[in-house]
Each structure stands twice: as C-alpha cells, then as structure tokens.
Image (cartoon, grey):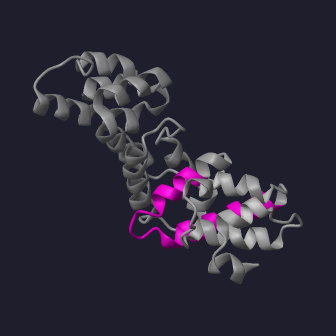
Amino acid sequence: MTYLEERKVNANLVFKLFKLDQPGDKEQRTLHFDAWVKYVAERVPNSLSKSLRKKVWNLYGDEGRAKMLKAFAENTPMKEALNHLWLDKTTVPLVRERLLNTWLEYGNTKKGVPKEMVEAIDSCDDEMRVAILEDLSKINGSDEVVKFAYASLMRSLRDEEKSIYFVFELFKLNQHGDIQQRTLPFDMWAKYAAKAPEKLSSEMIGKVWNFTVLMAL
C-alpha cells in the first residue's frame, strides 16, 4: 500500500487492483475493502467518483456504506459527513436509520453538537429533512437533536408561509388513519395550525379532532 500511497493512485484504479468488484473469499475481500476505504479517505478522497460510490453501495450494501462514512467523516463538518451518507428519497428507511445512527455516533464525538447537526439537516430539502427526523427519532440519544431540528424546520415553514395542509401532508399525518396519536410532529403541526391565519376545514377537523388539537387551538 505504501507504493500506492506515495503516488496517490486514484480510488477506482486501486478498487480494481484489489479486485473489489469481483467475487472472492469473503474474509479476504473484507480486509481488502477496509484497507481500500482507509486509503481513499486518507489519501485520495477527491478521486472517489459518484459512479464508484454507487458501485460500492451495490456491491457492499449498507455495511460498506457505513464503513465509508466512518472513514470519511473523521475531522469533517457534520454537513459534509451527512453528505457522505448519500441519502436520497429512494434510500430504504431501515438502511437510512442505520446510516443516521452512525452519523449520530460520530456527532457525539464532536463539540458543537447538536447545533452543527441541526444545520446539516437544515441543508436538505423539506421532504428529506422530515425523513431524516423520522429515522433519527427512533435512535436512542437523538432527542435533543430531533427537538431542535423540528423547531428549525417549523421556523422555515412559517417563514415560507406554507399552508397548514401542506405541512400536514409533509409530516405524513394524513397516513395515520382517523385517530391521531400524540407525537412530536403532530404536536408541532397543531401549534403551527393554531398560529396560522387560515382556518381548518370541516374535513381537516374531522381528521384531527382529539384532545391534543383542542388544547393547541
């Protein structure tokens, strides 16, 4: 590896050199993959192309993705570390939760958390922010980050003057059946609706008619 390190051979070439795109002994393949991840993260991080990232994800799954996050995230801002998760709307929720757990564990080793983590989440679009918060809320030790991130999201929605109906659907509250359970997203929405200039329609009242909304309104 010293030879490669000295010449800073690009990530894709070393990936092929280690035959990481080919089947083989699992234990040996894992050792080579771990060495490759460490090499790329420390020596040639900018040579990791999007196409190679996708190949790694397809071949090594969420475990490989988590290993890469741990390697790349060291000494980087939380926003950049979040980008290394390569999350999008097609990411399976279970996988997203595991990756976010790794991100949270990394964040707990840094100073300035949860502020920096909230700022990282804020950099995503509204739908992705909600998806991230849904999964983070399932992870132990995330309460403070989730609380502040939801508050930040609500401020953004209020500043953008989003409709109470838009926010209701954004939080997927229209998917919870006829009886709404008291959750943080629901409480946030109820407070948002209470301060909004628009009034609830009779249909909406029918969807959310319970003690929680009555207390908020």
**Residue 55 x, y percent position in the rendering:** 38, 23
Q: Is residue 77 visible?
A: no
Q: Is residue 168 left or right of residue 113?
A: right
Q: Is residue 164 above or below residue 52?
A: below
Front in this rendered view, residue 208 or 127: 208
**Residue 174 x, y percent position in the rendering:** 62, 55
Secondary structure mostly seen in magenta is: helix
Quarter holding residue 121: bottom right
Point out the image quarter for the C terminus.
bottom right
Q: Is residue 96 above or below residue 59?
A: below
Point out the image quarter for the N terminus.
top left
Q: Is residue 137 magenta?
A: yes
**Residue 187 x, y percent position in the rendering:** 63, 72
Quarter holding residue 178: bottom right
**Residue 52 x, y percent position in the rendering:** 42, 22
Q: Is residue 60 left or right of residue 156?
A: left
Residue appearing at x 75%, y 68% in the figure: 192
Q: Is residue 26 above or below residue 127?
A: above
Residue appearing at x 29%, y 16% in the figure: 16
Front in this rendered view, residue 174 or 149: 174
Farthest residue toward the bottom? 215
Front in this rendered view, residue 184 or 34: 184
Residue appearing at x 38%, y 68% in the figure: 140
Q: Is residue 72 visible?
A: yes
Q: Is residue 3 magenta?
A: no
Residue appearing at x 54%, y 51% in the figure: 131
Q: Is residue 75 left or right of residue 17?
A: right
Please report the bounds of the magenta region as a residue range: 130-158
Front in this rendered view, residue 46 or 120: 120
